[in-house]
Image (cartoon, rainbow, N blue to C red):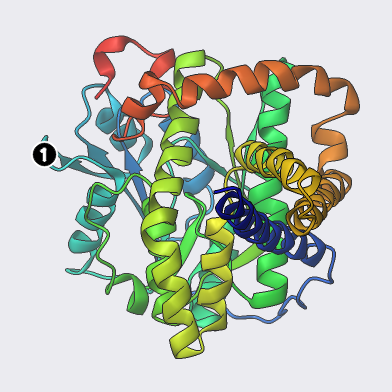
Amino acid sequence: MFLAFEIAILIASIITFVLALILFVEVIGAFLPMRKKVVDDFKPGPIAVVIPAHNEATSIEATLHSVLGQLRSIDRVIVIADNCTDETAEIAETAGAQCLVRNDRKRLGKGYALQFALEHLKNQPSQSVVFVDADCVLSEGALLSLAATAEREDRPVQALYLMQAPPEASARLRIGEFAWAFLNHVRMSGLDRIFGVSRITGAGIALPWRIASTLNVGSGEIVEDLSMTLTLTEQRKAPRLLHDAIVTSEFPTSEDALTKQRARWEHGSQRLAMRRSIPCFGHGILTGNLRLIAIAFDLMIPPTINFLGLLLAVFTLSVMTMMAGAPAAFGFATASMVLFAISIVAGWFKIGKDVLPLSSLVGLLPFLVAKTRIYGGEGRRSSKQWTATRSGETDKNTKQ
């Protein structure tokens, strides 16, 4: 009986070691030189900016301001007011955007809104399509840079998407900002520089119309960005990361909105990973698709705090097997802990010193406590539907 236990812990320690090694490789890859920026006079063709919005009256005006200021006369912006019960549509039209209203209570989700826009564009397609969330702001020049790179390389291009804590934010939110940047900035930089692939991270993705027109994202998938990443990479149209184009959003300050935001991503990404990461890995092996193998491995890595908890659990159990005279699992578990620690520290030196000063580590305990809400009943319920990012900060009658 104890032999079976030893074997199980050894297998678990090997698996966690492989995942920790992948994390380490991603982080170290972020320190490699960036690809040479192509400097030429290439001008992208007409761009269609698509903004799916569900009850985003409090934030969409700022988003439209950042987008409209970058449009040329040949470009357009389309807002999909999806099952809205607030003034999102009116605000979008007043700002100068084309607004399409979609009301379908049986098919809820951002993917349905995106597909609705793509079907509309088929009547008069643009050269490229850029998806932007309704609570985001584009850096100056980001729109043309994304579209030009997508057209030139004939592949999807993801902006560097960062979440920021408000100036008066608590130390707990600072830790959340670092965790977000650790994934979207550090790890995705490493993936892009080593393997030439990046996750689609939710906002600021540009696609040539040739590729966008083939998408079928009309589903209730809550992490449609990750699903799109895997599908495109399977088709050898892997997204890449463009560091110069930056898209930012601000963390909601209310506990309810923050819990819903994190729950949607964490529950959704883990469900998708369990469902698709291993089949995609196998498909990558069979077809020699290195980028698909890399992104499948990346998706297997749990959220950072969850991964730390898993490593600690395996390490603790491996101590028991070592004391019984079987040290192999302990060796793998120890190596995993070391790789994880180096990865976090290296990531902090890369992008975290300004975002997360050491004094902010006092927020670690509140951050961990907040995690319990994400995995409680409230978090599980909110992870199954598309709600406005700041719905917890607006009147309750606007919630889906």
Q: Nearer the viewer, residue 131 or 49?
A: 131
Q: Hey, which quadrant is residue 387 in on the image?
A: top left
Q: Give the residue drawn at x 79%, y 71%.
A: 34
Q: Give the residue drawn at x 71%, y 80%.
A: 38
Q: Which amino acid type is marked by label 1?
A: Asp
Q: Give the residue drawn at x 67%, y 61%.
A: 14
Farthest residue to the front: give it. Answer: 1
Q: Nearer the viewer, residue 135 or 339?
A: 339
Residue 142 pos. (x, y %): 60, 57
| Crowd band around label 1 with a 10 angstrom C-alpha radius: few (<14), some (14–19), many (20+) | few
Residue 83 pos. (x, y %): 19, 33
Q: Nearer the viewer, residue 26 or 162?
A: 26
Residue 167 pos. (x, y %): 73, 20
Residue 214 pos. (x, y %): 27, 74
Work out whether 174 lies above or below 338: above
| Tally of numbered tags | 1
Q: Which residue is mark 1?
A: 104
SS at badge 1: loop
Q: Nearer the viewer, residue 391 or 259?
A: 259
Work out whether 35 lies above or below 201: below
**Left or right position of 279 against 295:** left
